[in-house]
Image: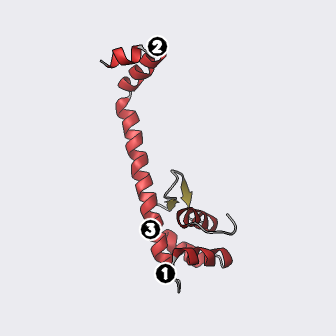
Amino acid sequence: MIELYFSFLGEHAMLVVEFYRRHALVLNGIVVLFGVCLTVAHRNTLRVEAFLRKHSDENDMRAIVAQLQERPLTSGELTAIRSSLRFPVISSTWHVFFYTITQDNIVKVLRRKYGGYGRS
């Protein structure tokens, strides 16, 4: 059935299907591994948010992001964030990129998640 469907697309489509069939385990493993890493990065973002809420007077993340743009995190705070995470990466909710734990990356990810104005 698949051969009939892809035969309408030409011989190159069948080459792609055959490549996938031969390497399905590896390709699917890569997709699952990327999904697990993305899940860990999103959970780390939530942990960073909880840390920032705990160490701030505000509870609103937009206000916390504005504060972060005005007053950067100290090296001790960044070290505390990194040490609380097994893998020191975070990810934006709307994108599939990973970022390391730095002041600029935390602000970038949280601004993408909660919106806001100022420097990017």
Q: Residue at x 53, y 83 (%)?
A: 56
Relative image position of residue 88 (x, y in whole percent): 50, 62
> Looking at the image, can residue 78 be seen?
yes
Up/down of 12 relative to 59, above or below: above
Q: Residue at x 44, y 70 (%)?
A: 47
Mark 3 or mark 1, whichever is nearer to me: 1
Relative image position of residue 6 (x, y in whole percent): 40, 18
Residue identifier under label 3:
46
Quarter holding the C terminus is bottom right
Secondary structure of the residue carrying numbered label 3: helix
- On residue 10, the disc is 2
Amino acid type of disc 3? Leu
Closer to us: 3 or 91: 3
Q: Which quadrant holds residue 30?
A: top left
Relative image position of residue 81 (x, y in whole percent): 51, 72
Is residue 73 found left or right of 46 in the rendered image?
right
Amino acid type of disc 2? Gly
Residue identifier under label 1:
59
Looking at the rendered structure, the number of numbered marks drawn on it comes to 3
> Looking at the image, can residue 74 be seen?
no
Amino acid type of disc 1? Asn
